[in-house]
Image (cartoon, helix red, strand yellow):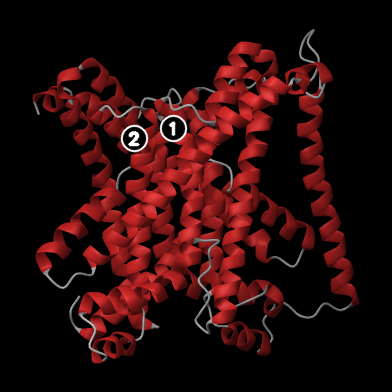
Amino acid sequence: MTGASVLFDAPGPVARRRSLISSIIGAVVILAGLAWVVLTLAAPRGDLPGYFDPSRWEPLTEPLVWQRILTVGVWGTLSAALTASVLAIILGIIFSLLRSARTSWIRVPTAVVIEFVRGMPVLLMMLFILLVLNTGTFWAVVAALTLYNGVLIGEALRAGLVSLPRGQREAGLSLGMRPMQSKMLVEFPQAFRQMLPIIIAQLVVLLKDTSLGYIVGYVELLRVTMNQLATFYGNYYLFSFFVVALVLYLIMNLSLSWFARWVARRTASKSGRPVLNPDDEDQAILMATAVADARQSETGHG
Amino acid sequence: MDAVIENLPLYFEGFGMTLFLLGVSGLAALVIGTLIAAMRISPVPSLRWFATGYTELVRNTPLTLVLFFCAIVLPLLGSRLDFVTAALIGLSVYTSPFIAEALRSGINGVPVGQAEAARSVGFGFSQTVGLIVLPQAFRMTVPPLINVFIALTKNTSVAGGFFVVDLFATGRILANARGDAVIAILLGVATFYLLITVPLGLLAARLERRWVVQR
């Protein structure tokens, strides 16, 4: 069902007026809520000025602060996210191949590893890698994110592989390709293309999860703004730094989300396949794995 | 292994806190998420815009930042919540848009013909949604909702980084105290998490398969 328009009549004059009135009431309630928040923030705190007072935002006028936020904070976040993204995609490819291997002594242990990693908090993995393998915080963050997201990307790719028409593989084999060649040259590129929106959506999750590095002590955006700078300048400016961190995260995540949606629209218009919604990776993976499972029961070798 | 058995009472305490966080914030998120989903399909434009904006904003904010706000920035702004309540609020708010999206995608999965049929026999908005669409959407919504709860289970560990003594925090404290048995202690913590997530995952997978067969 697309669009809510089926659910109610094309509004006539009375319904339109009613809708307009409730819309206005709704808007007033929402705006009142927002105004209350803004006024509470703007109200003076004891003998200190409110949170929108220019003096609260003073550190942000210093170029050095921005340099620190961008070159240490944003860079810390982005470099961890980028490294982990590349590694996670590679790991995902490996996992999807192992998981769809023909020999059961490869397939079954991989499935167990996948279930194990999927059921664990990323934060726990970070702590484990940090304490047990003693890798330093950057590699602890990167390794945990790689492992966790690699598994999820692997599952998505496997679903993409299984959901391909069987004829693709048969055509590859009939041309004299070895099974591995057919998989890598014929099937994989198609599966990857079809699952690209889901993979990018997963990378948004990865980017968000780099902030978990804050808890294990990795120096990224959250630690630079909320811990280092806020400690240096004092709690007086904590709220301002929080707003800066929030806005920077939103800019990074929203642009990646929008990119995922754009890719999804492009792949959808190119191939006539059902659109996988990147807004909701659970539903999309659900749909993909549902298709995959259905097909596996069809060919008889689950 | 001894380190785990010796400290089992502490583990159970942490596990209890994790279950408490999961239960309460799961319920609260379900309520907020349903409200947001209802706003999102309602005929009132301002509510639709608000719901869309809320979903977009909250979903693109890292959980760490949300919990940081609840545990550290809010007290500065004058709230007197204890850390557990702050974590509950943060987890509920963070989870609610995911619940709303799961519900909405379930509703979107109901064929248009169903709603059209309901409309053509003269049902209004609330009748169409309440009697025809939602009962069918519910079945399709359960597996993704279970997945949201699995994610929430894992997300409660982030609260452990913000002064709540849950399973993760317990593991961290124990690992610091017993430097010789870090691996055993953390694997113990992992087992407790898997105790919640693996059964839920199996349940979701089973329901998914049933759903595919029926469609």
Q: Residues within 10 Å of mark 2 (few under 14, many from 20)?
A: many
Q: Residue at x 26, y 18 (%)?
A: B176
The chain that hosts pointer 2 is A
Residue B150 in view of the camera: no
Q: Amino acid at mark 1?
A: Gly
Q: Residue at x 40, y 49 (%)?
A: B151
Q: Amino acid at mark 2?
A: Met
Element carrying mark 2: helix
Callout 1–callout 2 Cβ contact below 8 Å: yes
Quadrant containing the C terminus of chain B in the rendered view: bottom left
| Residue at mark 2 | A126
The chain that hosts pointer 1 is A
Specify the label residue B151 is tagged with: none
Residue B3 occupies which quadrant of the picture?
A: top left
Most foreground residue, B101 or A55 = A55
Establish if A297 lies above or below A285. Answer: below
| Residue at mark 1 | A213
Residue B155 occupies which quadrant of the picture?
A: top left
**N-terminal label among 1 and 2:** 2
Q: Is residue B174 left or right of residue A246?
A: left
Q: Residue at x 62, y 28 (%)?
A: A69
Most foreground residue, A133 or A177 = A177
Most foreground residue, A91 or A275 = A91
Q: Position of residue A92 (x, y in %)?
A: 33, 58
Q: Is residue B181 left or right of residue A3?
A: left
Q: Position of residue A214 (x, y in %)?
A: 47, 29
